[in-house]
Amino acid sequence: MLRIAVPNKGSLSETAAEMLAEAGYAGRRDSKQLHLIDAANDVEFFFLRPRDIATYVALGALDVGITGRDLLLDVRMPAREIESLGFGDSTFRFAAPPGRFETLEQLEGVRVATAYPGLVDAFLDERGVAVDIVPLDGAVESAVKLGVADAVADVVSTGTTLRQAGLEIFGPVLLESEAVLITGPKDVEGTETLLRRLRGVMVARQYVMVDYDLPAKLVDRAVEIASGIESPTISPLRDPEWVAVRVMVPRKGVNRVMDDLYELGARAILVTAIHNARL
């Protein structure tokens, strides 16, 4: 039975649960439930703090897990990313009072506050910059104002929170993070099935199916507009001069595709959501 770690709360929890449900797995009914056996799919779920998941997987207590790339790298243990899952995006940057620092080298010997000490320390070690890490559990933007740090390293979205704290971003991006599927040092039976199912969900979220009717003489031009994953399916209609076309296209931009097909001469253009897929 495959043992899977899932975030029990936080920004990754809800979307991770939705993906697993769309992939055909059982879900917990109570948010306080910490353990669930899905006998039909031969898996066992453990609902854990996102920050702890990489540790459990690295130590072999659990086989695979869903967590953030940032949390995986922060623990600095032998768990490994096997697939990015397309949600939970975040960017890590350095910030300090305006004009205080411009380059990483200027951080040498100063105090840097962060909720990700392992991640930040590894990033700076690779670049030969030694700092005094001040580990904090969230709200690091207050560290400079309260005098416990000279700079911070934190998740940045729009930068509004940092600016409100009187800080400005400087230096390179530390990490572009997102939710990832991780496993330990050894491959475990059942992981490939889970991975294939999750990939099917991601495809379904990124693509839609477009059906339309078109004069047969225009098929080549229509394929230039929407070529599909491999190639469209072309079927004859009762009118020998017309064909029916079915093609997968990216969800983003599908209205532009519909506009272009209509301008070309396609009619009865229909868009259908894909609930799951195997490519």
Image (spheres, rainbow, N blue to C red):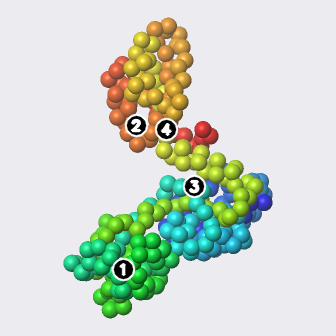
Point out which mark residue 254 bears: 2
**Disc 1: CA contacts within 10 A as few (<14), some (14-19) or many (>=20):** many
> Are the two marked residues, 1 and 2, in contact with CB atoms closer than 8 angstroms?
no
Disc 1/disc 2 C-alpha distance (Å): 41 Å
Label 4 secondary element:
strand
Label 2 secondary element:
helix
Under mark 4, the amino acid is: Val
Which residue, given by chain and number where applicable, does mark 3 sit on? Answer: 83
Is 135 placed above or below 16 here? below
Under mark 3, the amino acid is: Glu
- Where residue 266 appears, x then y in whole percent? 39, 21
The quadrant of the picture occupied by the N terminus is bottom right
- Where residue 85 appears, x then y in whole percent? 54, 55
Q: Residue at x 32, y 92 (%)?
A: 147
Label 1 secondary element:
strand
Which residue, given by chain and number where applicable, does mark 1 sit on? Answer: 152
Label 3 secondary element:
strand
Of mark 4 and mark 1, the one earlier in the sequence is: 1
Which residue, given by chain and number where applicable, does mark 4 sit on? Answer: 208
